[in-house]
Image: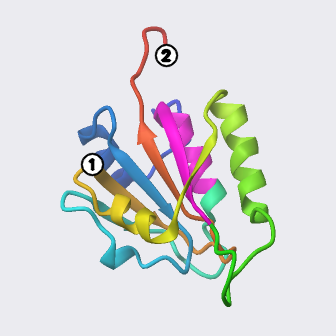
Amino acid sequence: MLKHTLLHPAMLAAIARAGHHGRIVIADGNYPASTTLGPSAELVSLNLMPGVVDACQVLESILSAVPIDFAYVMDYERTGPYALKEDPPVWHEFRRILKQHRPGVELGLIEKWKFYDEARSKSHILTVQTADRRIFANMILDIGVRMEGE
């Protein structure tokens, strides 16, 4: 029986094949997951119904199973119809979860179109499409190295 909380077979298989610097995308319900897959990436759709499963639940399950070196979010727009004046509320949750499971890992920002380019990279191994309705609840995780004793 597994000791971590990640149980999804396809997610586990993709992560097991990955190594250091493999990239995992956690995507909100608005993210164009099918058109931003890297050449070796798997797409797992966990969008059962609006809000179920959300990005924070996926982040917690992944962090229970995989060491992460870096976490990047899609930077929000400051002009236009989706402009925000401050960080999206979901980022506060991301930070809380990272602090709990991976102290020292901070959220990095990647501009929206560059985020899509990064997701299409050869290092991209998995996208988990959630049904999160919160905007800018997208994240790229870089897999780290499992240290002795972990």
Scheme of colours in the image: rainbow
- For mark 1, give the secondary structure: loop
> Is residue 46 shown above or below 124?
below
- For mark 2, give the secondary structure: loop
Real-space Cα separation, disc 1 to disc 2, in angstroms: 23 Å
Quarter location, residue 89: bottom right
> Is residue 34 shown above or below 18?
below
In-image side of 91 versus 69 (left or right): right
Disc count in the image?
2
Image coords of residue 35 (percent x, y) = 31, 78
Q: Earlier in the sequence, mark 1 or mark 2?
A: 1
Q: Is residue 23 magenta?
A: no
Range shown magenta: 57-75
Image coords of residue 46 (percent x, y) = 49, 69
Q: What is the residue that sits farthest to the top in this orientation?
A: 148
| Residue 150 - label | 2
Q: Is residue 65 magenta?
A: yes
Observer-side mark, 1 or 2, equals 1
Image coords of residue 114 (percent x, y) = 42, 64
Residue type for callout 2: Glu
- Which residue corresponds to the image point at 67% horizontal and 27% vertical from the top-left? 103
- Mark 1 and mark 2 residues within 8 Å of each other at the beta carbon: no
Q: What is the residue that sits farthest to the front in this orientation?
A: 79
- Which residue corresponds to the image point at 46% horizontal and 34% vertical from the top-left? 66
Q: What is the residue that sits farthest to the bottom in this orientation?
A: 81
> Is residue 115 shown above or below 47?
above
Residue identified by numbered label 1: 123
Residue type for callout 1: Ser
How many other residues sit within 10 Å of disc 2, few (<14), some (14-19) or many (≥20)?
few
Decide which of 25, 4 is in the foreground and name it.
Answer: 25
How many other residues sit within 10 Å of disc 1, few (<14), some (14-19) or many (≥20)?
many
